[in-house]
Amino acid sequence: MGLYELTATDKRKNTLKRSSVFFKFAALRNTGILVLLVGLWVALSFLSPFFFDSHNFVNILQQSTIVAISGVGMTLVIITGGIDLSVGSVAALTGMVVGVLVMNLHLWSLLALMLGLMVGVAAGVINGFLLTRFRLQPMVVTLGMMTIARGLTLISTSGRPVFVTDSTIIAIGNGTFLGLPVQVCIAIAVAVVASLALNFTFFGRYVFSIGGNEEATRLSGVPVTRYKLIAYIISGLCSSVVGIVLVGLLGSSEPTVGIGLELDSIAVAAIGGTSLMGGVGGIGGTMLGALLIGTLKNGLTILDIVSYYQQVLIGVVIIVAVTIDSIRQRNQQ
Amino acid sequence: MDMDRSDIAPILELRGIRKAFPGTLAVDHVDLDLRSGEIHGLVGHNGAGKSTLMKIIAGALDMDRGAIRLRGQEVNFRSPRDAIDAGICMVYQELDLAPNLSGHANIFLGDNRYRTWPGLVRKKQEIRAASEVLTRLGVKDVDLKLRVDRLSLSNQQIIAIAKAISKNAQLIILDEPTSALNESEIRRLFLVMQRLKKENVAIVFITHRLDEIFEVADRVTVMRNGTVIVDSPIRETNRNQIVSAIAAREVLSARRDEAEKSLSTRVVLKVENLQVGDSVHGVGFSLRSGEVLGITGLMGCGAIDVAGALFGAIKHTSGTIWHDGQEVAYPTPVSSVKRGIGFVPHDRKAQGLVLTSSVRNNITLPIVRKLCHFMLVRRAAESRLLESAVRQLSIKLSKLGQRASTLSGGNQQKVVFAKWLTERRDLLILCEPTRGIDIGTKSEIERMIRQLATGGMAIIVVSYEIEEILNTCDRVLVLYEGNVARELSGRTLSKDQVVEAMYGGEARTLPQG
């Protein structure tokens, strides 16, 4: 510590922080939501005998995976200061492309999956290109993409679902790997890779910098356009992964799947402490956000609460979580 | 200039006005009389106290001490509203119009004359009344129905003046109204000012261009360091007197007397006929390694744009740039950083720092990619670089992960500097490197600029502060309206010469005294 010149107040603050584990814990980004989540688990365990059960925890994980995966891409894009409203539609379009390729055109399933992922890449490239090249607002561009992708999905089969019986794809939705559902494993893998990328690579540094101050980042010699484009491509890819998982889960490519997924993804990112202003956030928080929503949906269903009430309660929790986070941030400054 | 009105009772008298801001005395012991039907020119350097004084008159700032008398009655304006009600309006440089409203709506904004319950507007009457105001100003060619942000700046200004007149202003303060206008627009503004003068309105006209003062003003006041240096009818003074009063001829610091050091012969940067939009009209120079070149002028002279264009922060329209003997067709920040140029922008918060990120991320942003091994940042190597940069600049922080927003202004500026010191660079472009930071840090940074140059770096310092330029530079380009007015170095580099050139003066020596 001798390296830096510390002012008297700095020193006092430092010792204060050191002296108390509690302070350190309270200063962590996602403490509020973690407390909320554990509190919810405890409460639900008392309220229902069915809640605290390993099978049910797997259920919760399963219920959280979809929004967790799309939330990863969303978090990345939001940290750059943008937003991606096309995630739900791109997921549906991917599912439809995969379904048609495998069932109607009898393509080899792995190839179909690769092509499905290309749908997300293409959507990301188009989104990213339009909003960097013409300096359009991300909200508007991705809103357009959301409508286009949904329209294409409906056009491709005139709005009818495609039933998928391919074993590989079904396994993605329903199989298990190391005792966990495959879809949960996929979500964990996506989250871990994204988290590593954000925290330990130059790409992550650029993403945070662009969202914090795009002009300052540009003037530091960072090719801002390229990295914004990459963020939208990653978001598109995550959407496609979601689309594939959904096909496996449902056993069919449903053209209306993923409606409202963009809003859920934004919600879990926001709950997890990712600032919609850009520059601040993290994957860990988004995962906790997804778990919180998953737990709520699961718990409220176990308690036999009508789904209409569930929506109201979930909305309340979103607002409470974001409020706690905002109060914590203000206290930190 | 038709008659001397010094004997007429002033409409507004200022006595012993004083206003201090933390760290500076902005206005001190100022007495000033403003008369109806008189155009009163007000000149002085940026920071001389002109704007502060005018904001006090217009009710936008409180004074610490002093008295303001309006037609002999002592007044105390607590808000711009009070001043407007008393007939005093200020037209700010950044015209406070509602950009999305039409011209007529702006003129009568906050005025309920043409309103009916529940908030509807008698539009036809309002338009008619608004065009009457314009007729009084002798202006016909402004479309009142257009949203004002679709109007030229000059027309917006007319709207702002019309707004003041519609409120029966008896005293109008124009804060650098000509700085962004072209020649014909300035002509029109002067005609409007003459019209107002005939209507017996008192006008305060702030400008940096002395020619305009001599053309249109009846009286001129020069401020320097918060006090009035000259206050005289225009015909009793002359250009040289005004320039001397603005500059405050002082004996220069001893640094100038150093024998001209022997510079290296390696030309790092050569620029010919650089043009940028309509702000820079052909600037050329060459810069050797180890040399500090100052670019200065009045605000809006184009110096900042020259710096921005050299780095590629903004696009130049024409001209040729050679870096290390290689022609650079289109500099971009990416290519400039690769070629070894560092850039400190003039707006630290908007362009210099990522406030939401840590000091660590800010400092290594330009080089973090090179610090990576398979995309992963090598933290240990990074920390070593950071620690040496932090030590070199003595940045005060508790840890490298500290958020940039929690640092003081001076330390933030050092962080922006540190970005360019973690790796060998041969050219630094610094825009207002010490703006808005404390005096201690300021002299530290000035010292560091000299040190870096001694170490062989070529440095460009763009600044509007003459002291800073004189303290750091070997050679100075003074820009005037986008052209190089003068190039000064060695013994010819003095405060007087710089100031003279800043105000568009010819290359001639001033009478001493």
Image: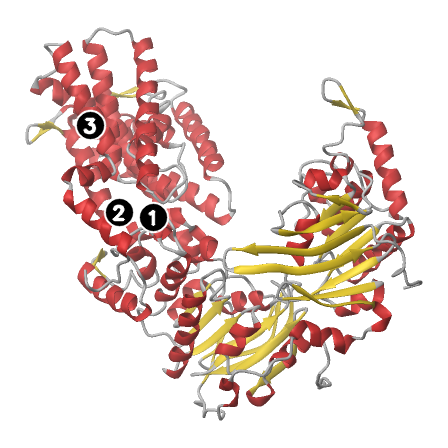
- The answer to whether one can see residue B253 in this image is yes
Placement of A226 over or under B437, stated as above or below: above
Instruction: Specify the subunit that label 3 lies on.
Output: A
Quick check: do tags 1 and 3 share a chain? Answer: yes
Asked whether the beta carbons under mark 1 and mark 2 sit within 8 Å of each other, the answer is yes
The three-letter code of the residue at mark 1 reads Phe
Asked whether the beta carbons under mark 1 and mark 3 sit within 8 Å of each other, the answer is no
The furthest residue to the right: B2
Q: State the CA–CA distance, disc 1 to disc 3.
A: 26 Å
The x and y percentages for residue B319 are 59, 73
Nearer the camera: disc 1 or disc 3: 3
User: Residue drawn at (69%, 53%), measured in percent from left and top?
Assistant: B54
Q: State the CA–CA distance, disc 1 to disc 2.
A: 8 Å
Disc assigned to residue A35:
3
The x and y percentages for residue B496 are 64, 80
What residue is shown with label 2?
A: A198
The three-letter code of the residue at mark 2 reads Leu
The three-letter code of the residue at mark 3 reads Val
Nearer the camera: disc 2 or disc 3: 3
What residue is shown with label 1?
A: A208
Quick check: do tags 2 and 3 share a chain? Answer: yes
Q: Secondary structure at mark 2?
A: helix
